[in-house]
């Protein structure tokens, strides 16, 4: 499970998404997040799902990597889906009724939409940001977008550097965690059997050395930065100058169009009846 975590990893490539300006990708990810949270009907979710499926091969990221990014979320998705199924009440008669538990069509639909929302949110933001953008480029793009805040004495550079360091060390901490787990297993530690309390106690030999290693790495990094005379209060030059191209404008127009369609589907007066038709197709034609 630890080796399946792909959060924060960067996969170099030469796809169209890779070659976008990092500022463009940050704006695209923001617009995509807004689209996902504004979607409230079946047509919108279908449109966002198709867009996400098209984005995966466009970014030249394999579906196995995408599956690994979703795998750690399966338990959370199942738990929240069960809560939505049994806690959502509907206007019509329940589909299933057992003791005090009742399952309505609305509960199944809400659980389905919630799961789809989380999945496409994780995939879309990862494709626009960490999977196709190096931490350095992401830091430069974020610092450039937030530069107007410097006139309000906001430490934009410090914030960007903290984010860059955090993203850089996520794969390192994952690798360190896997090494410590293998070392503890070779000494007889068991992390998979027993009840919840026993598993929590078994994690203590894992957490303590992991925190010690993380603090040691942080101290070494701070010392290395001080030895190189790193100063946050000085204006720094950039190795690569960020420039917008025609492809950046086209991608931003595409996301603006997608956002406009999602908003239109949300405010259309007849979208409720349209959803009812989708509910029937989804649950009564299988």
Image (cartoon, helix red, strand yellow):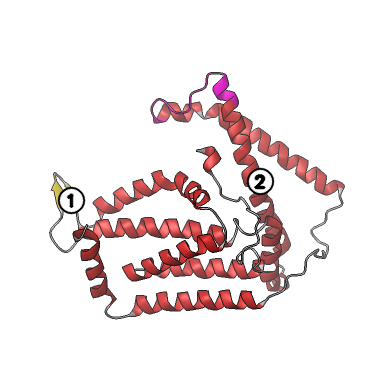
Reading the image, the residue beneath label 2 is 169
Residue at the spot x=60%, y=29% of the render? 180
Residue at the spot x=20%, y=52% of the render? 103
Left or right: 117 with respect to 171? left
Residue at the spot x=72%, y=73% of the render? 243
| Front position in the image: 174 or 165 | 174
Residue 187 on the magenta span:
yes
Relative to 128, say whether 261 is above or below: below
Count of numbered labels shown in the rendering: 2
Answer with the quarter of the image where residue 132 lies: bottom right
Q: Which residues are magenta?
A: 183-196
Judged by its main secondary structure, the magenta piece is loop
Question: Are discs 2 and 1 less than 8 Å apart at CB?
Answer: no
At numbered mark 2, what does the secondary structure look like: helix, strand or loop? helix
At numbered mark 1, what does the secondary structure look like: helix, strand or loop? strand
Does residue 57 show up?
yes
Reading the image, the residue beneath label 1 is 102
């Amino acid at each position: 499970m630890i080796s399946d975590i792909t959060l924060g990893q960067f996969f170099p490539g030469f796809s169209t998404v890779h070659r976008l300006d990092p500022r463009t990708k940050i704006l695209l990810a923001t617009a995509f997040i807004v689209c996902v949270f504004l979607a409230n009907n079946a047509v919108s979710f279908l449109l966002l799902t198709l867009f996400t499926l098209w984005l995966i091969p466009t970014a030249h990221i394999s579906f196995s990597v995408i599956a690994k990014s979703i795998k750690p979320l399966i338990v959370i998705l199942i738990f929240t889906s069960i809560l939505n199924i049994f806690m959502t009440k509907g206007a019509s008669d329940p589909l299933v009724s057992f003791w005090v538990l009742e399952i309505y069509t609305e509960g199944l639909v809400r659980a389905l939409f919630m799961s789809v929302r989380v999945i496409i949110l994780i995939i879309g933001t990862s494709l626009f940001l960490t999977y196709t953008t190096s931490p350095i480029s992401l830091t430069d793009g974020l610092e450039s977008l937030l530069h107007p805040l410097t006139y309000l004495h906001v430490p934009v550079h410090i914030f960007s550097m903290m984010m860059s360091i955090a993203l850089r060390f996520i794969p390192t901490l994952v690798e360190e965690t896997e090494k410590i787990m293998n070392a503890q297993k070779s000494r007889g530690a068991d992390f998979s059997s027993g009840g919840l309390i026993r598993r929590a106690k078994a994690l203590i030999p894992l957490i303590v050395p992991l925190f010690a290693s993380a603090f040691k790495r942080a101290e070494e990094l701070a010392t290395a930065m001080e030895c190189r005379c790193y100063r946050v209060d000085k204006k720094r030059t950039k190795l690569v100058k960020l420039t917008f191209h025609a492809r950046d404008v086209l991608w931003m127009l595409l996301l603006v169009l997608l956002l406009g369609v999602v908003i239109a589907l949300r405010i259309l007066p007849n979208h409720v009846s349209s959803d009812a038709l989708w509910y029937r197709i989804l649950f009564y034609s299988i």
